[in-house]
Amino acid sequence: MSADLSNPAIWLDGVSRHYTSGGQTITAVSDVSLELAGGAVHALAGPSGSGKTTLINLMIDAEQPDEGRVHVRDDVAGGWEHMAFVPQGLGLMNELTIEENVALPLRLDASSNRSSHRDIDELLESLSISELAHRFPRDVSLGEQQRAALARAFVTNPRVVIADEPTAHQDEQRARSIMAMFAGLAAAGAAVLLATHEQRILDKADTVFMLENGQLISG
Ligand code: ADP
Ligand code: MG
């Protein structure tokens, strides 16, 4: 499937976000308008401090814009299981095993259509964490924790996936196979957004949104 530009999953209209800190106002995101089309992998690029994480927080409703609006397509807004998020800090639950972490969205998603869910064993296998299924997050490497967080995002076959620095802890070969998994989701129609400063992700993305000092300078 090619990018569906006519019907974006999420779109931002003149969104700004300011922080006040020590009497100073910082504009973390400044008048950003963009569309996340289904069927494409989008990269959100820019140096540290350019506003990538703030922009993601606005998209996932973790923060509210001071100006402008964030729109979410009805079929995505209608169920949290349709929008997956992989935070930079991964957000695994320490008291659950790797497998239980990956399965958590399915346990919480009692209502919806289970036939759309991915097979957990296959998912763990494709991310090379099957052997670790019964370990706790603290007993595996950071790279393995990150792959578990990705598996947890993929497990519901979401329509939107937003990931902050998703291959930061991966070697070349793993990064390539993870990018192939994102591309597979996009090929099935999902809108994918990857915040990154890694060239290997930018090379594989269908579109690149470039942020500088909170402003969108291209994309
Ligand atoms: P990036 O993810 O691209 O590194 P961020 O979105 O984290 O950028 O930050 C953008 C800017 O906003 C930075 O100058 C950062 O210091 C500032 N900022 C982010 N969060 C806060 C906050 N809660 N309070 C004050 N300033 C913040
Ligand atoms: Mg960040």
Image: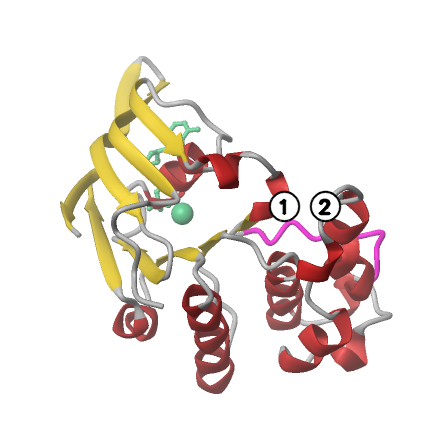
The label number, if any, that marks residue 112 in the structure image? 2
Locate residue 184 relative to residue 43 in the image: left or right.
right
Please identify the quarter of the rendering in which residue 179 is found: bottom left
In this figure, which residue is indicated by the disc labeled 1?
81
Q: Residue furthest bottom?
A: 173
Gap between marks 2 and 1, in whole Å? 9 Å
Asked if 103 appears above or below 180 in the picture, the reply is above
Principal secondary structure, stretch drawn in magenta: loop
Q: Nearer the viewer, mark 2 or mark 1?
A: 2
Is 104 magenta? The answer is no
Q: Nearer the viewer, residue 185 or 180?
A: 185
Locate residue 13 relative to residue 158 in the image: left or right.
left
Sequence-wise, the earlier of marks 2 and 1 is 1
Residue drawn 48% across and 66% down? 185
Locate residue 129 relative to residue 153 in the image: left or right.
right
Image coloring type: secondary structure
Is 94 magenta? The answer is yes
Q: Nearer the viewer, residue 52 or 127?
A: 127
Q: Residues within 10 Å of mark 1 (few under 14, many from 20)?
A: many
Residue drawn 59% across and 63% down? 150
Instruction: Name the element at disc 1.
Output: helix
Position in image of residue 28 (x %, y %): 29, 32
The label number, if any, that marks residue 184 in the structure image? none
Position in image of residue 115 (x %, y %): 72, 61
What's the amino acid at mark 2? Ser
Position in image of residue 53 (x %, y %): 40, 43
The span shown in magenta is 89-97
Asked if 41 appears above or below 78 in the picture, the reply is below
